[in-house]
């Protein structure tokens, strides 16, 4: 089994405060991983440590590469479009992505836009919250990489859009690529997860197959996750 | 399809396909949709579908043909066995629950019989 990600003894502090401590995390190719944890637990920080936009102690290797510039080329990260002004048209954002990322597949992007009903002639300022998330997903999935990081793709959007986004993940994730999806409520993505990673107490608290939770404890992913926060799983 | 998050998803996928086999939506020898299509249709992970199908191939309820896809077995004895197995699983559940209510075997038979007769009358 080959690994797409190997994090070894990674620690990260911000303003002398420990955000993550001694993180060891190995992810296999071809999996969908739910990255779960409370707001402020360090999910986004973990993703930024993987891409290299945050620098901590320890080593991070993506597809065997530890050099940040190389790592970035293996990763498609759902960025929030903050770098673009509100008057930017979607077409211009797309042109930018095509210029910057050699692995951006315009044909695939068009398919995603059709499926997610995205009108690319609109300006960023005229997009609803849900539409903006769909655009981010389409841009992220249109790249052909080994590792996809989706940072809270479902926050604040309606259930129809959520379902569409979930379907597009199943449809378009390349078979050998791994995808990490962070979220703090899990019920809707639970059926598509291979594994769950729970961030708690400044580290990786649990990393296990999703079906093993159901099999061993007879509880759902959400109930299991909540029980960890309330203090301990009830074993039969 | 709605999933029960407390039950392993691969298991529910198997049951879903069994159900289609029992109700004739998937007849003996029928071709199953491609793995990714099944995943999209059921809104589940491709790997989980593969695990479910892998187990079904192992137990002989579906057959994999290289390059062609997956097919419901044409072995009707195997399908009959599967039906029996599914029936026993359901009966076991009912039996355990009635047993837990302190019913004896004779009482369980009697109450099932009575239930079925009354149910029949209501439907007439």
Image: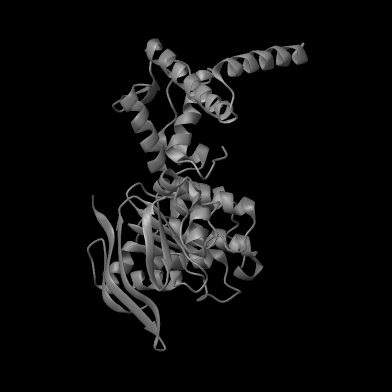
Residue positioned 39% across, 62% down in the render: A76
What is the residue that sits farthest to the bottom in this orientation?
A15
Q: Is residue A27 above or below residue A84?
A: above
Q: Is residue B108 above or below residue A199?
A: above
**Image position, residue B91 (x, y; %):** 52, 22
For this view, does A73 lie left or right of residue A45?
left
Residue positioned 23% across, 66% down in the render: A65
Residue positioned 42% across, 66% down in the render: A199
Q: Is residue B54 above or below residue B110?
A: below
Count of marks placed on residues: 0
**Image position, residue B68 (x, y; %):** 34, 25
Q: Out of A28 and A11, give the one closest to the viewer.
A: A11
Q: Out of A161 and A13, give the one closest to the viewer.
A: A13
**Image position, residue A127 (x, y; %):** 63, 65
When asked about the image quadrant of residue B54, the answer is: top left
When asked about the image quadrant of residue A23, the answer is: bottom left
When asked about the image quadrant of residue A15, the answer is: bottom left
Q: Out of A141 and A10, give the one closest to the viewer.
A: A10
**Image position, residue A149 (x, y; %):** 41, 62
For this view, does B109 lie left or right of residue B54?
right
């Amino acid at each position: 089994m080959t690994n797409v990600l190997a994090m070894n003894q990674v620690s990260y502090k911000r303003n002398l405060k420990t955000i993550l401590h001694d993180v060891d995390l190995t992810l296999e190719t071809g999996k969908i991983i739910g990255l779960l944890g409370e707001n402020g637990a360090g999910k986004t920080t973990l993703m930024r440590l993987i891409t290299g936009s945050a620098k901590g102690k320890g080593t991070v290797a993506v597809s065997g590469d530890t050099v940040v510039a190389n790592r970035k080329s293996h990763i498609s990260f759902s960025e929030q479009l903050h770098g673009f002004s509100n008057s930017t048209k979607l077409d211009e954002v797309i042109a930018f992505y095509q210029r910057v990322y050699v692995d951006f597949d315009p044909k695939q992007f068009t398919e995603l836009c059709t499926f997610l009903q995205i009108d690319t002639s609109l300006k960023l300022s005229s997009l609803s919250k849900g539409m903006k998330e769909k655009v981010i997903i389409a841009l992220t999935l249109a790249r052909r990489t080994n590792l996809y990081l989706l940072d809270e793709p479902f926050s604040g959007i309606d259930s129809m859009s959520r379902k569409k986004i979930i379907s597009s993940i199943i449809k378009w994730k390349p078979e050998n690529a791994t995808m990490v999806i962070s979220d703090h409520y899990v019920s809707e993505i639970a059926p598509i997860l291979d594994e769950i990673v729970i961030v708690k107490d400044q580290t990786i608290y649990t990393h296990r197959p999703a079906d093993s939770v159901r099999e061993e404890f007879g509880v759902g992913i959400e109930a299991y996750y909540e029980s960890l926060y309330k203090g301990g799983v009830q074993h039969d | 399809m709605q999933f029960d998050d407390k039950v392993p998803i691969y298991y529910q996928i198997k049951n879903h396909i069994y159900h289609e086999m029992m109700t004739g939506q998937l007849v003996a020898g029928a071709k199953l949709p491609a793995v990714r299509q099944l995943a999209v249709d059921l809104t589940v992970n491709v790997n989980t579908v593969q695990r479910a199908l892998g187990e079904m191939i192992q137990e002989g309820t579906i057959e994999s043909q290289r390059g062609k896809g997956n097919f419901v077995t044409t072995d009707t004895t195997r399908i009959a066995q599967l039906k029996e197995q599914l029936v026993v699983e359901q009966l076991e559940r009912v039996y355990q629950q009635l047993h837990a209510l302190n019913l004896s075997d004779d009482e369980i038979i009697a109450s099932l019989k009575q239930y079925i007769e009354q149910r029949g009358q209501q439907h007439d």
